[in-house]
Image (tube, helix red, strand yellow):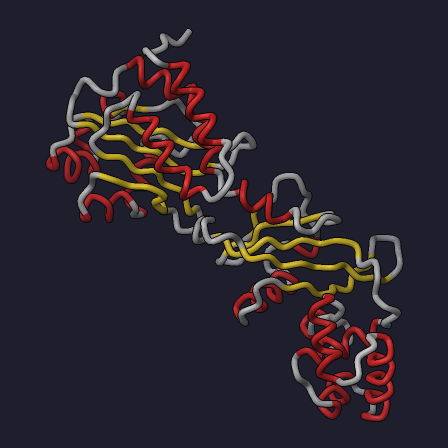
């Protein structure tokens, strides 16, 4: 049974209120830290989000540290130190006095924090309800009496609320709901890895290294605010078909290592376009001439021209340029890297 500090109910209520606020996490962080100050009168604070690919922390909010301390706290060396302390696991908050090794053997404390005048501190590991390591909150004081054991134990009760408040997947899940009929999805990182998207399963075409993800990343590099295209896909035991793939850039407030949400949905209205016509549209979107298309597809230019006439009729487009614009807007094309008939 946790011995609650004075004002515990109000602190819990205020944190839950801040955590429930809409908008970017950057707007919630200062409010969260202000509430925590009522429990731990810290001299410095930092809220980190984990970049698991670089094994470093990205600061969401920070105050009271000089630049040398900040550089260390953001570094991979600090992350390795947190691993040694077990702060990469879902565990109760840990004060400096609780560390399994003497503080004098901790580089962050002995070389940076204690020389700067700090006398105590506490770290809170942040994990989502589904087990994702989100980051870390550190609060340091110039008074060895703070944080008290009572405050430390109460912070253990508050940690799930704090984790929910800074979870970058909150805004990403909201973003993914733009595609109402999405049946699968992942979050694509800048390193080409994928993270599970809560609420949606993955899909074979969304595995790391897949050409679909390569096309998704390339479309963002080319400056598309968002993009939609078709991917040929045969359902196991079924006939050839297509999936509609939608690429949405992650919000600016998301951690820097997260690139985009990639979703798949049924391709329900192809406007009567055939598989070959969808491939030709993919080449048309890329600005290819009929001659180059014919060489790529190993068909005659006359055949390409016939396909192009059918495409213009089906998209009700008076010109090749307008057909390309409508194909982009509707996501009615198969990008060249995904076309099954490429040489």
Question: Is residue 291 visible in the rendered structure shown here?
Answer: yes
Question: Horizontal and vertical percent for residue 340?
Answer: 76, 71
Q: Quadrant of the C terminus?
A: bottom right
Question: Horizontal and vertical percent for residue 230?
Answer: 74, 65
Horizontal relation, residue 130 to residue 313: left or right: left
Question: Vertical placement of 248 versus 301: above or below?
Answer: above
Question: Vertical placement of 231 versus 198: above or below?
Answer: below
Q: Quadrant of residue 155?
A: top left
Question: Is residue 276 visible in the rendered structure shown here?
Answer: no
Question: Horizontal and vertical percent for residue 296?
Answer: 73, 85
Q: How many marks?
A: 0
Question: Horizontal and vertical percent for residue 254?
Answer: 47, 49
Q: Residue at x 28, y 41 (%)?
A: 62
Q: Quadrant of residue 90?
A: top left
Horizontal relation, residue 49 to residue 207: left or right: left
The residue nearer to you, when weighing 116 against 193, is 116
Q: Residue at x 35, y 16 (%)?
A: 153
The residue nearer to you, when weighing 124 against 319, is 319
């Amino acid at each position: 049974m946790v011995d609650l500090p004075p004002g515990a109910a109000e602190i819990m209520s205020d944190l839950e209120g801040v955590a429930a606020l809409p908008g970017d996490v950057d707007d919630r962080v200062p409010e969260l830290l202000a509430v925590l100050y009522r429990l731990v009168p810290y001299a410095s604070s930092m809220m980190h989000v984990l970049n698991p690919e670089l094994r470093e922390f990205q600061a969401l909010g920070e105050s009271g540290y000089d630049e040398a301390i900040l550089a260390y706290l953001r570094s991979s060396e600090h992350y390795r130190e947190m691993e040694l302390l077990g702060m990469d696991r879902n565990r109760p908050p840990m004060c400096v006095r609780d560390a399994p090794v003497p503080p004098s053997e901790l580089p962050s404390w002995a070389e940076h924090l204690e020389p700067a005048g700090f006398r105590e501190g506490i770290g809170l590991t942040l994990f989502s309800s589904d087990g994702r390591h989100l980051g870390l909150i550190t609060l340091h004081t110039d008074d060895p009496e703070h944080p008290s054991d009572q405050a430390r134990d109460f912070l253990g009760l508050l940690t799930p609320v704090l984790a929910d408040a800074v979870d970058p997947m909150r805004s990403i899940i909201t973003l993914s709901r733009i595609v109402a009929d999405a049946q699968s999805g992942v979050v694509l990182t800048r390193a080409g890895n994928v993270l599970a998207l809560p609420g949606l399963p993955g899909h074979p075409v969304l595995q790391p290294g897949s050409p679909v993800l390569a096309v998704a990343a390339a479309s963002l590099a080319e400056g598309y605010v968002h993009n939609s295209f078709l991917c040929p896909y045969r359902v196991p035991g079924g006939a050839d078909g297509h999936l509609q793939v939608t690429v949405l850039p992650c919000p600016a407030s998301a951690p820097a290592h997260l690139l985009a949400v990639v979703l798949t949905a049924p391709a329900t209205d192809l406007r009567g376009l055939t598989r070959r016509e969808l491939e030709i549209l993919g080449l048309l979107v890329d600005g290819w001439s009929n001659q180059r298309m014919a060489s790529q597809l190993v068909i005659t230019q006359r055949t390409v021209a016939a396909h192009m006439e059918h495409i213009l009729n089906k998209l009700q487009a008076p010109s090749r340029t307008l057909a390309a614009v409508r194909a982009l807007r509707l996501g009615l094309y198969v990008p060249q890297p995904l076309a099954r008939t490429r040489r």
